[in-house]
Amino acid sequence: MSFDVHELDTFVLVGSAVTLLAILAVRLSSRAGLPSLLIYLLMGVALGEQGLGIEFEDAELAHALGFAALAIILAEGGLTTSWREMRSSIRLGISLATIGVAVSVTVVAIGAHFVLGLPWELALLLGAVTSPTDAAAVFSVLRVVPLPKKLTGSLEAESGLNDAPTVVLVTLVASGAVDEHGPLALFGIISYELAAGTAIGLAAGFGGAWLMRRAALPSSGLYPLAVLSLAFLGYGVATSIHASGFAAVYVSALVLGNMELPHRAATRSFAEGVAWLAQIGLFVMLGLLLSPGRISWETVGLAVLAGLILTFIARPLSVLFSAVVQPMPWRELGFISWAGLRGAVPIVLMTIPLAEGIDQSERLFDIVFVMVVIYTLLTGPTLPHVARVLKVARPSEPRGLEVEAAPLERIAADLLQVTISPVSQMHGVEVGELRLPQGSSVSMVIRDGRTIIPEHRTVLRHGDDLLVVTPRKLREKTEERLRQVSAHGRLAQWLGERERRTH
């Protein structure tokens, strides 16, 4: 296939325009409470053969590009996830990514065979590709829903880890290896890939952190590139020995993201930008891969039925069985059941049987695509409401306080920029009443474009921006204290303590 400079010019023109539109669409999707992936998918469909006429039918290329994009998204998820928040719920997250996936695959496969009438091979593929939650969808939606840390931690851990076993399972089913191996051998293969991938990820993470602390790179812009390269080094090493590259890249990024490394804030910002670009490219490409002319009412009906089985039977049962390792109240388990967001991952996994040329794989691809769109529209926007109905939302943490951080590397401290919004109870509180941890202090107040050097009796107002300097080891306590005051005002001294005890 030739690719001359004129085609490159056209590609740059169309690619930059689509990327800019996709970036602007983020604001629209966030206001509507929708994962932005839906808009990107529809953009791809609009650009496709029955829209602007761009033809894209290369399933093997889609498979390769899709896996690369997923690896980038998982790396960003690991780099931006706090281990402190995840640690208390990691057992449930791992259980959801293993036991939960097994239960979900079994239930959906049985339902697809006996209810939808699909052959066993297609039924098992449908169960395997639809069982994992999507990291991009989970990270983008749950980070704006005020939830206890144990809920967000378990859901983020699940979405980061459950790609690995499902990729192995889908590959084995699509290649026909399931018929050659018994269930015990299949379990052994999946266990090896997960364990080896995790071990390589840990080695890449801790070894990379040791190297980065001692490296004196000539430019700060090289540090984000080096960190991402270390995460992908883990991916490459794992895949070269037939281990799980997804487990390796996520674990290595999780380790690197929680170590004290130079320019850590810049690294996270860079990773977020690259991940957004990967999401946009991935979802638009998957939209291009769809042929709307193949979608029939039968396809829509099968997608709805399959989604009902997955959402209302398989997902609750998988959460129930997974919770054996870390029991939780039924309200929290109910929310986790509803928050099993599917996104690009099921569609990307469907490119494996497409590339293998499995009989009726195009039909199954269409069913999965329609199901993802319908049930993402159903679950994504309703998550905040479901959280309130089940009483798992945290009304004590309204979005009345926005915190951004910049590193002060030489003294191992962070400079926090805190914005007091119109709903914050910090209005009217004096600086001295914040009672920040010893060593943290408010260094400046910016009000109506003017700078104020605060005193102990300086009264804070809505719309103020505070610059707070805190030692890095006290940053979490400082942010927690600021959020308590934002939620309760002067009463935060005793209400915050009572709330922590109830959680």
Image (cartoon, rainbow, N blue to C red):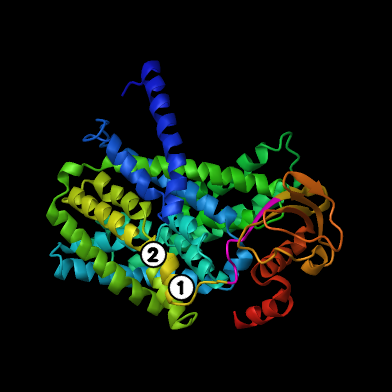
Q: Please give left or right for residue 196 compared with residue 494 in the image.
A: left
Instruction: Write down the region rendered in magenta.
Output: 396-405
Q: Nearer the viewer, residue 150 or 188?
A: 150
Q: Residue furthest right?
A: 455
Q: Residue at x 68, y 49 (%)?
A: 264
Q: Position of residue 291 (x, y in %)?
A: 21, 41
**Amino acid on which disc 2 is placed:** Thr
**Which is nearer the N-term, disc 2 or disc 1?**
2
42 w.r.t. 47: above or below: below
Q: Quadrant of residue 89?
A: bottom right
Q: Position of residue 62 (x, y in %)?
A: 33, 41
Q: Position of residue 97 (x, y in %)?
A: 43, 67
* Residue wearing tag 1: 388
Residue 99 circle label? none
Residue 382 circle label? 2
Q: Is residue 181 visible?
A: yes
Q: Quadrant of the C terminus?
A: bottom right
Q: Position of residue 390 (x, y in %)?
A: 44, 77
